[in-house]
Amino acid sequence: APDHHAFDYTFENLANTIQAFIDQLNIKRFAIYVFDYGAPVGFRLASNNPEKITGIISQNGNAYRDGLSDAWDPIQRYWRDGTPENRASLKDFVSKEATWFQYHEGVSDPALIAPETYTLDQKFLDREGNVEIQLDLVKDYKTNVESYEKFHEYFRKYQPKTLLVWGNKDPYFLPAGAAAYKKDLPNAKLVFYDTGHFALETNVTEIAEEILEFMATLPA
C-alpha cells in the first residue's frame, strides 16, 4: 500500500482507485460483494456505475444510520472535534486486543475462529505508518455517513437485486442497519446468522449456499 504521505487515504480515493481498475479492464457488468469498509467503497462505485451493476451482496456492510452501534460514539466525537487528543484516543482500535475482539464478539463458539485470521490481520495493521492511515480512514468514515442518502437514492431508483447476509451480534453494525435496506429495496433477501462481525468465519457454508443461489438469478 502507498505510504501515508504519498496517498490521501479517503474512501473517495479508494473508490477512485477501484474505478480506475474497472476502467482499465473495460469491465462492462459486475456484481459486488461488500463488507465493512468495503460497503461505502462499493456503493460509491454502484452509484457512479448503475448500468454496470448486476447485483449486490452485503455481508455486514452498512449503509444506514440505524446500523451504527454505540461503539461508534468515540469515533463520532472525533468527527465533531478533530483534536489530536481525540485522534490519539482511537489508536486502540487497531490494537491486537481490538482485532481479537472484532473476530470473537458475538461468536457462540470461539473455537470456530481460526487464529491465523486475526493474527495475520494484526501483522498488517502493525506495519510502519499504518496506524496513521487507519486513523485517517476512521476520520473520513464521516463522509460515508454523509453519503448514505446518495446510496439510498441509487437503491430506490435502480432497485438492484440484493442479498443481505448479516451476523446479528456484530458489535459495530446492528441488525437494524440490515433491516433498513428493506425500506429502499423491498425485494432484497435478508438472512441473519447468530454470529458476529466476521460472519464467514462461523457460517461460511450457509452463506456460500445463499450466494450461489443468488448469483444464479443474476444476468450473465
Image: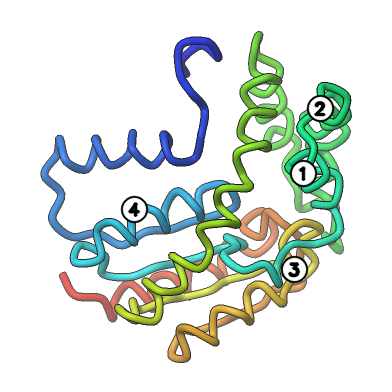
Q: Please provide percent x and percent y for residue 44.
A: 39, 54
Q: Which numbered disc, 1 or 3, marks the residue that appears first in the sequence?
A: 1
Q: Please provide percent x and percent y for residue 53.
A: 26, 65
Q: Nearer the viewer, residue 99 or 141?
A: 141
**Is disc 4 in contact with disc 3, using a CB cutoff of under 8 Å?**
no
129 relative to 10, above or below? above
The residue carrying mark 3 is 174
Q: Please state which of the two labelled residues, at mark 4 or mark 1, is closer to the viewer.
A: 1
Circle 4 residues within 10 Å: few <14, some 14–19, many ≥20: many
Question: Mark 2 to mark 1: distance in Å?
Answer: 9 Å
Q: Please provide percent x and percent y for residue 126.
A: 71, 17
Please state which amino acid type lies under the numbered disc 2: Thr
Question: Mark 4 to mark 1: distance in Å?
Answer: 27 Å
Residue 80: image tag = 1
The residue carrying mark 2 is 83
Please state which amino acid type lies under the numbered disc 3: Leu
Left or right side of 60 for 172: right
